[in-house]
Image: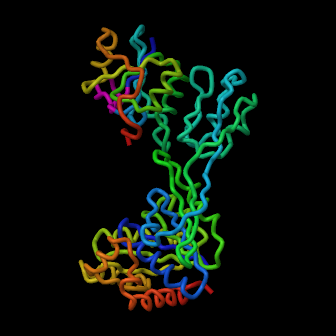
């Protein structure tokens, strides 16, 4: 049972929903939280986990043995990302563009390419009380995000998994959502929130993932998001009102369900509504 | 000598294009005979690494010098490996840039003039 918390727009409250939900569920079942926002993982700021395991995520990129390279250009034809080119009679690698598919190595007729590991980031795992915790952390300056997201998801061990997705609708989000049983889409009642919610809905429909909306900062702005959800038949699973006290709790790196115990029931009810929306 | 100029249009009086990999047209000019041809950017449809792909195209076309507005780090490395001289011009028409090149008034660069993805 894998539930992804996603949103088109950044800063809507994905992590707030993910960490509070994981904490509440962990009181009654084994739960893990996987922070898939590897470019800026932040769930640890609220769960304060003890991280006791770490391993590196690597891909294999080609290196050219210049004495063997005949400059035939097959490698460059095979590469979809222009990460290898024949310039000045020999192949030249641009490692930061390489996605590690290994195609160039396979087509080289001169065995002039060998593969060397290139580090993309790290996976850290541990626990926060009863919540099992995993996060990925991309190295600064590395543009290749998806393999790190996959590596985070490979660490999944529990039956109930909450995925904290990156914002947006691009490849890292698709990598997070793929294989999920349900997507909780967090948004806010602003024109930006609505615009980006529509993009996120398009994405989860394309992926065939059942979904519902959490409306954060409810009470601000306009009714447009609710009208859109009603019109599209998308359930609103939870409304979190705009409240300065909530903002203070979050700014101090604490959980809403710790400071406001009444909200435990709200997040538990959110889970029941997610269960009710699953494909049977 | 075969020279490539990045241009915003398909004629010699078109404005010089400031971007290399994402230019609209390449003008391939022969400084000896004065003949030239315009080629729409041959790598325009590619999502990334276009500076490298463009350098590879210029190699195939046996271009010896390039005149453009800016070069990113990958393009600069690719052109250097290919042995294609890169010359920087700012503004004006393609023809004026070519004239300046012939008269030796353009600065040759061996490294990038802008950071990666500046032409996106």
Q: Which residue is drawn at 65% across and 33% down?
A: A63
Q: Indicate the position of residue A177 as horizontal and vertical percent values.
A: 54, 68
Quadrant showing the C terminus of chain A: bottom right
Q: In which quarter of the image is the N terminus of chain A?
A: bottom right
A112 or A24: nearer the viewer: A24
Q: Which quadrant of the figure has residue A51?
A: bottom right
Residue visible at 51% across and 56% down in the picture? A137
Give the camera-side residue of A207 and A43.
A43
Residue ID at (50%, 58%): A38
Residue B113, given in percent of the width and then of the height, sits at 35, 29
Instruction: Say if A226 sits above or below B3 in the image.
Output: below
Residue A183 at x, y percent in the picture: 51, 76
Nearest the eye: A273 or B94: A273
Q: How many labels does the image show?
A: 0
Q: What stretch is highlighted in magenta?
A: B6-18
User: Compared to A19, does B85 lie above or below?
Assistant: above
The x, y position of residue B106, in whole percent, is 31, 15
Instruction: Look at the image and name its color scheme.
Output: rainbow
Query: In the figure, A141 relative to B107: above or below?
Result: below
Q: Residue at x 61, y 70 (%)?
A: A179
Q: Is A250 displayed left or right of A113 in the figure?
A: left
Tell me which secondary structure the magenta stretch mostly adopts: loop
| Residue B7 counted in the magenta span | yes
Q: Does the magenta stretch include residue A180?
A: no
């Amino acid at each position: 049972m894998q539930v992804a918390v996603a949103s088109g727009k950044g800063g809507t409250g994905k992590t707030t929903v993910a960490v509070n939900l994981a904490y509440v569920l962990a009181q009654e079942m084994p739960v893990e939280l996987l922070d898939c926002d590897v470019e800026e993982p932040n769930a640890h700021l609220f769960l304060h986990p003890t991280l006791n395991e770490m391993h590196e995520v690597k891909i294999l990129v080609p290196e050219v043995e210049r004495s063997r390279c005949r400059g035939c250009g097959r490698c460059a034809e095979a590469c979809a990302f222009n990460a290898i080119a024949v310039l000045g009679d020999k192949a030249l690698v641009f490692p930061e563009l390489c996605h590690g598919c290994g195609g160039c190595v396979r087509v080289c007729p001169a065995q002039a390419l060998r593969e060397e590991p290139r580090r993309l980031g790290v996976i850290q795992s541990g626990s926060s009380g009863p919540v099992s915790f995993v996060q990925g952390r991309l190295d600064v300056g590395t543009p290749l995000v998806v393999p790190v997201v996959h590596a985070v998801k490979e660490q999944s061990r529990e039956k109930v998994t909450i995925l904290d997705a990156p914002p947006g609708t691009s490849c890292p989000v698709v990598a997070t959502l793929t294989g999920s049983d349900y997507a909780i889409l967090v948004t806010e009642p602003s024109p930006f929130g609505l615009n980006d919610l529509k993009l996120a809905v398009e994405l989860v429909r394309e992926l065939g993932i059942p979904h519902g909306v959490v409306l954060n900062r409810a009470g601000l702005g306009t009714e447009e998001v609710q009208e859109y959800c009603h019109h599209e038949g998308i359930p609103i699973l939870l409304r979190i009102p705009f409240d300065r006290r909530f903002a203070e709790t979050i700014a101090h790196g604490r959980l809403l369900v710790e400071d406001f115990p009444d909200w435990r029931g709200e997040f538990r009810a959110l889970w029941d509504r997610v269960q009710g929306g699953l494909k049977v | 000598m075969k020279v490539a100029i990045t241009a915003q249009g398909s004629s010699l009086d078109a404005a010089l294009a400031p971007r290399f990999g994402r230019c609209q047209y390449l003008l391939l000019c022969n400084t000896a005979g004065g003949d030239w041809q315009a080629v729409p950017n041959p790598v325009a449809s590619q999502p990334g690494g276009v500076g490298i792909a463009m350098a590879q195209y210029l190699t195939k076309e046996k271009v010896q010098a390039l005149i453009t507005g800016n070069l990113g780090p990958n393009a600069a490395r690719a052109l250097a490996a290919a042995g294609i001289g890169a010359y920087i011009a700012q503004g004006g028409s393609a023809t004026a840039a070519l004239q300046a090149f012939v008269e030796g008034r353009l600065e040759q660069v061996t490294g990038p003039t802008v950071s990666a993805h500046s032409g996106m």
